[in-house]
Image (cartoon, grey):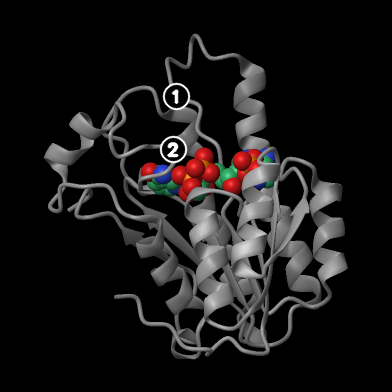
Amino acid sequence: MTTTSAFLKGKKALVLGGSRGIGAAVVERLAADGATTAFTYSGSKDAAEALAARSGAAAVQADSADREAVAQVIAGQGPLDILVINAGVAVMGDPLEIAPADVDRLIDINVRGPYHAAVEAARKMPDGGRIIVIGSVNGDRVPFAGMTAYSLSKSAIQGLVRGLARDLGHRGITVNNVQPGPVDTDMNPADGPLRDLVHPVMAIKRHAKPAEIAGLVAYLTGPEAGFVTGAQHTIDGGFGA
Ligand code: NDP
């Protein structure tokens, strides 16, 4: 059973990339914990509207690769207590074959987007605010070929949270990286092609449910996590153990 309370009542939260998967679970969890929650989406309008209807969160269309569009959404929310940067894409395959434009777009969404969004939100974030980025265990460990661009982008998030935690610590703002292992979403379905590759090397041989990742995010947003910053929080069923 998931236990929640309204410990985020009075807080304003924005989740970038919240229409599906881990982001949608985070939206539902933050709204259930009492935060006034908004989220962005890119292409999944129907899923975004359904999530807004069931969670009470507000949906706003904005491509995370578009710095100006995301900055406008952030400015439009007013001061944010919580920013969760979840939007991410994966481009897998032989780097000698992958189209350079696909890698550039991945870097725009997975690296440039998080940097600029975090900085824009920090401008007006009150003291004690929370910035959380969804990275990946592949920021630490790349056990298969074909993941170079993706793992590059997730390693970059580690540096982002370390640096920004230093820059914002004097305001009591925490900046953290949540690094999931395999999670059952459209990006990596539990019955998809990665299952037989990754389950044998895990201590807990299954994909996570998105709600399990949202639980760790919720902890990091809460009052007990004010001393947790600049850190990488791996939640991977022992994938990297
Ligand atoms: P999904 O592909 O299932 O969902 C991705 C979400 O991000 C969707 O809501 C999508 O919105 C949004 N998104 C993607 N691109 C953009 C964009 N350009 N602008 C705005 N929103 C965007 O992915 P997951 O839920 O699996 O992944 C979420 C995060 O977790 C990613 O950063 C991913 O790298 C990371 N992760 C996932 C793991 C897994 O095994 N699933 C493991 C480790 C990390 P829309 O559909 O509207 O475009």
Nearer to us in this view, 135 or 7? 7
Mark 2 lies on a secondary structure that is: helix
Report the residue at 38% width, 22% height from top. 146
Q: Could you say which quadrant of the image residue 185 lies in?
A: top left
* Crowdedness near tag 2: few (<14), some (14–19) or many (≥20) residues, C-alpha within 10 Å: many
| Circle nearer the N terminus (2, 1) | 1
Reading the image, the residue beneath label 1 is: 92
Camera sees residue 111: no
Q: Is residue 208 above or below residue 145?
A: below
Q: Residue furthest top?
A: 97
Report the residue at 80% width, 47% height from top. 67
In the rendered structure, find residue 151 and report the number of the disc placed on it: 2
**Residue type, numbered disc 2:** Ser
Confirm if mark 1 falls within 8 A of ligand 1: no
Marks counted in the figure total 2
* Residue 16, percent from left and from top: 66, 56
**Residue type, numbered disc 1:** Met
* Residue 135, percent from left and from top: 47, 52
Mark 1 lies on a secondary structure that is: loop
Q: Could you say which quadrant of the image residue 85 lies in?
A: bottom right
Q: Is residue 81 above or below residue 208?
A: below
Do the residues bearing badges 2 and 1 touch, measured as CB atoms within 8 Å?
Answer: no
